[in-house]
Structures are given as C-alpha cells and as structure tokens.
C-alpha cells in the first residue's frame, strides 16, 4: 500500500507538469483549431531561459520562472504572428505541417546556438525528503511542482471563466465572426491565447528540467508528445480536460514504471490513448456537440 | 445615419453586389427584401466590415467606414444581429449579454442595460444561467437581439430574424423591433418574409441578384403589383 501511495504521489508530480503543457495545446486548438506541434519546443525554450537565468545570472528561482514565462509568451506570440497567422484561412493541414516544421526549426536552432550536449541544471532548491508516513515520502520539489501547477491552473480557470479577456477567448473559439461583431479584436485575442499557453509551457519546461536536472535541445519532444496525448485524452479544446488528462497520463506512467516495467511505460501511455479514443473519440471530457441551426 | 454608395462586392469571380446604393435615415426602419441569393446578407456583412468591398463607399453618421475592421464598427454605433442568431452556444445567457457590452466601460449603466434587456425579454431572465445553445430558436433570437442591444447602438442591423421561427414568435420578434425603434434605435432589417418586413418598415428596397430593382415607401410597396407577385404570393 505504501508503495502504491508513493507511486501516486510521483504520478501527480509528473502529471502536473504534463497538465501545464497540455493546457497550451488545448487552448491553441480551442481557438485556432491547430495542433501546435512546436509547443513541446516552447517548453524546451522555457527551460533554457530558466537555465540561463539560474546558472548564468544566478537569479532566484521565482524571478527565473517569471522571466522565462514572459520570454516564452513573447516567443509564442511571435511564432504565431510569423508562421501561423498568414495561414489562418488556409487549409488546416498547411498550418499543421508548418507547426511540425517550426518544431524542427526550434530544436535545431537551439542545438546550433547551445550545442547538443545536455547542460546540468543547477540545484536551485535544496532537495529535502519529507516523510509523511512510514515508507511514503514527498520531496519539497514535488510539493512546489504540484502546488505551482495547480495554482496556475486555478488562475487560468479564473481568467477564462471570469475575466473579459477570458470571455473574449471563449467567444472567439466558438465563432470568430460573431465575436468581431461584439467588438472583439480576434487577432489580439489569439495572440493572448498563444502568450498564456506558452507561459504555462515555460513553467512546465522549467519544472521538468529541474526534476530531471538537465536541459538539452530535444528535451521538449517526449513531454510535449505526452502532454499532447493528455490533451487529446481529456478532450482537445476543453481546458479542464487537459488538466485531467495530464494527471491521468502522469499516473499511468509512474504506475507502469512501478508495477510493470520502466521500458513499457510509454507504450502503456499511448496504448491508453488508443483505447480511450476507440470508446470515446472526443476524449474523456469532450462532447460530440450537436449544433443548432 | 447610414449611407451606402455604389457598393461592389465579389466572391472570387462572382459579382455578388453590383453597384448597390441605399440610405437609412435616423429613426427609420428600413428593410431590404429579396429572394435567396439576392445579396442581402452580403450587403449586411459588407456594411459591418466582415467583407471588404471592391468598390463603393459606406458612411455611418457622416464618417466613412469603408474598409474599417469589423471589430471597430460596433464602437462606432452600429450593431448587428447576424443571420442564424450566432449566439455563443457554450456560454450562458448572461455571458452572451456581457459579450454584447464588451466595449462598454460604464459599469453602473451596464447593470441598468441588463435589467432593460431582461424586462424586454423576461424569458431570458429566467434562463440567465443556462447555456445559450440549449435554448429554442426563438429564445436564441431574443438573446441575439438582447446581445446586440447591450452595445447601445444608434443603428441596429438585423439579418433574417424570422428565419426558422414559428409565426407567433415572428410576430413577437417584429413587435420588439418596432419597440426598439420607438426607443430611438434606427433599424436596417433584411428579410425574406417580405410581408412582415414591409408591414413594420417605413421604407424598403427590393434587391434582385445584387441590384436594387425597386425602392419606396413600405406601405406602397406592400400594394405594388411586382412585389405582390414576386414576394407576397
């Protein structure tokens, strides 16, 4: 039992990171119907920004986090402006392929700039294990990861549900023309969505790098892919779905690692996705909405 | 109030509006009637900035608005109730109304506007927390109207408000249009239901394949032989 609870705690730890990243996929999909495959690389960029802030400039963790979020928000908005916006009215496949190309461009750009060699993330937080019960421990890093992620998710939920910007985002995601008729600046709203999604990705990336002690140009691929799976699993375009999906993926992964085998963990994650999609193609919280004419 | 001159709009190679000119004066209800495909919705979309004209000019209260982006037009005093209501289905009734007041910053008066809308449409008040997509067509039409009125427009464009509604609801919607007009909002009404439209309008234009073929006093057009034959049956 102790081992099971321990695995669940570990699962919630990775799961909260996946959830943060998954939010970026789902928000962008919700508003422009694009799977932004470069989002995984945004988390890599966020990790690098955090790495430089921490290792080169020795700033405190909190400041490194904020700087990384702001810079990633700008990167996300710029990518949208340069690569996706010109294709807004093009067939969806064009934007999708562009996103894949953007992903490769970012990976190779960072490899060119900083080398393929992984860099060691400084230990920003003095690691402490806190024993909650015999055989069950949680590290202070895991507590920070989980609390920060959940806090940001609650903040996002508040922004989307209650603020004017959030309402504009929901309106644009439903009907761009009708939103324009309400006086909503659609381009600006899409930019804000990319900014928020990328900022959350930056947090996910930095937490991921700290949890695994390193940064490298291709580090975004696997967590990016798993977060994408999480977003689809929860119901792409549905914000609570991305959060739920992230935690589900995190739990499946650690439980497989703990009870089955480490090498099978990824196979289980993707296997679960296939099974869920067979029985619920729109994802766990996704609805096959019927539209009223 | 609204003046459209020599409007030409193309969809690719299709010449949808061919030199359209019309005018709506302050305080009037003007209707644009015509069959399917005559260019009614295209006209409204162009006026509200969703489509760009190839040629021609549009002015609103003596300001040229040709080519002004759609999201800026509402702030200039012109609101639109689009064809097919286009309410935000996954947002509540209240949130839909809030979207209508998106550009307004006068908090206290916004509250007053909600009350006005809810007084006009008591059904919406009962359902204020319900998702708009779960309501009937008539209720959605009321919501779309309420939403447009939340911006406190000087002129309201209405695109086919009668579409798909039971006659009793059509009557209700048209009564509301008259009421809104009496409260000082100028109305440009686009309709296929020519009889209803002409019975409440001051003036009317008849649109046929992108051109205005007839215009005049609405009551006179109601008795006009060509109109009777073509649209009133």
Image (cartoon, coloured by chain):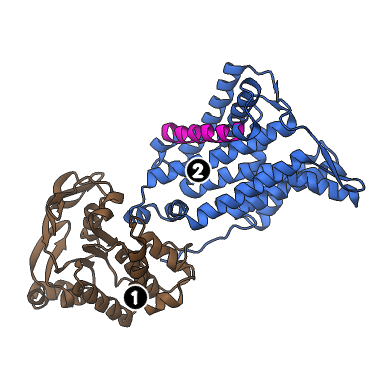
Chain colours: A blue, B brown
Image quadrant in which you'd find residue B233:
bottom left
Which residues, given as a range, are shown in magenta? A64-83
Return the residue nearer the eye: A119 or B232.
A119
The answer to whether any part of residue A236 appears in the image is no
Image quadrant in which you'd find residue A121:
top right
Q: Tell me: residue A9, above or below residue B197.
A: above
Q: What is the quadrant of the N terminus of chain B in the image?
A: bottom left
Residue underneath mark 1: B165
Counting labels gives: 2
Q: CA distance from mark 2 to mark 1?
A: 36 Å
Image quadrant in which you'd find residue B146:
bottom left
Return the residue nearer the eye: A151 or A205.
A151
Residue underneath mark 2: A34
Return the residue nearer the eye: A44 or A93.
A44
Is A75 covered by the magenta stretch? yes
Q: Tell me: residue A152, above or below residue A42.
A: below
Residue B209 x/y as whole percent: 17, 58
């Amino acid at each position: 039992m102790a081992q099971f609870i321990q695995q669940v705690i570990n699962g919630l730890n990775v799961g909260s990171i996946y959830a943060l990243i998954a939010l970026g996929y789902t928000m962008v999909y919700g508003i422009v119907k694009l799977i932004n495959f470069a989002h995984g690389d945004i988390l890599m960029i966020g990790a690098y920004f955090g790495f430089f802030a921490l290792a080169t400039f020795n700033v405190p963790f909190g400041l490194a986090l904020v700087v990384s979020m702001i810079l990633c928000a700008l990167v996300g908005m710029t990518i949208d402006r340069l690569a996706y916006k010109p294709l807004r009215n093009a067939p969806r496949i064009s934007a999708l392929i562009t996103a894949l190309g953007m992903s490769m461009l970012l990976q190779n750009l960072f490899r060119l700039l900083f080398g393929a060699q992984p860099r060691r993330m400084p230990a920003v937080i003095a690691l402490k294990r806190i024993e909650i019960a015999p055989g069950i421990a949680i590290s202070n890093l895991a507590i920070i990861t989980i609390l920060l992620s959940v806090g940001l998710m609650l903040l996002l939920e508040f922004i989307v549900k209650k603020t004017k910007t959030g309402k504009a985002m929901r309106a644009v995601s439903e009907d761009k023309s009708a939103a324009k008729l309400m006086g909503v600046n659609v381009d600006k709203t899409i930019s804000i969505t990319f900014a928020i999604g990328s900022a959350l990705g930056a947090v996910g990336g930095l937490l991921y790098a700290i949890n695994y002690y390193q940064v490298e140009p291709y580090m975004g691929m696997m967590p990016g892919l798993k977060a994408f799976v999480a977003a689809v699993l929860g119901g792409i375009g549905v914000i609570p779905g991305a959060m739920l999906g992230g935690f589900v993926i995190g739990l499946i992964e650690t439980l497989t690692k703990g009870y089955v085998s480490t090498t099978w963990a990824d196979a289980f994650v993707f296997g679960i996705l296939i099974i869920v999609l067979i029985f619920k193609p729109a994802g766990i919280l996704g609805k096959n909405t019927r539209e009223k004419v | 109030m609204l003046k459209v001159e020599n409007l030409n709009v193309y969809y690719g190679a299709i010449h949808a509006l061919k030199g359209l000119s019309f005018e709506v004066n302050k305080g009037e209800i003007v209707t644009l009637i015509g069959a399917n495909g005559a260019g009614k919705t295209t006209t409204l979309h162009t006026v509200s900035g969703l489509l760009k004209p190839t040629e021609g000019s549009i002015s609103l209260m003596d300001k040229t608005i040709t080519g002004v982006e759609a999201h800026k037009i509402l702030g200039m005093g012109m609101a639109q109730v689009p064809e097919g209501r286009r309410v935000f289905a996954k947002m509540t009734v209240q949130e839909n109304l809030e979207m209508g007041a998106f550009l307004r910053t006068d908090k206290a008066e916004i509250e007053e506007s909600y009350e006005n809308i809810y007084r006009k449409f008591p059904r919406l008040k009962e359902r204020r927390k319900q998702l708009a997509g779960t309501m009937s067509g008539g209720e959605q039409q009321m919501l779309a109207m309420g939403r447009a009125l939340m911006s406190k427009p000087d002129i309201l464009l209405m695109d086919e408000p009668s579409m798909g509604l039971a006659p009793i609801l059509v009557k209700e919607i048209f009564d509301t249009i008259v009421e809104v007009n009496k409260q000082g909002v100028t109305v440009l009404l686009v309709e296929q239901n020519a009889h209803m439209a002409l019975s409440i309008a001051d003036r009317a234009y008849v649109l046929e394949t992108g051109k205005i073929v007839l215009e005049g006093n609405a009551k006179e057009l109601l008795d006009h032989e060509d109109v009777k034959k073509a649209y009133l049956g």
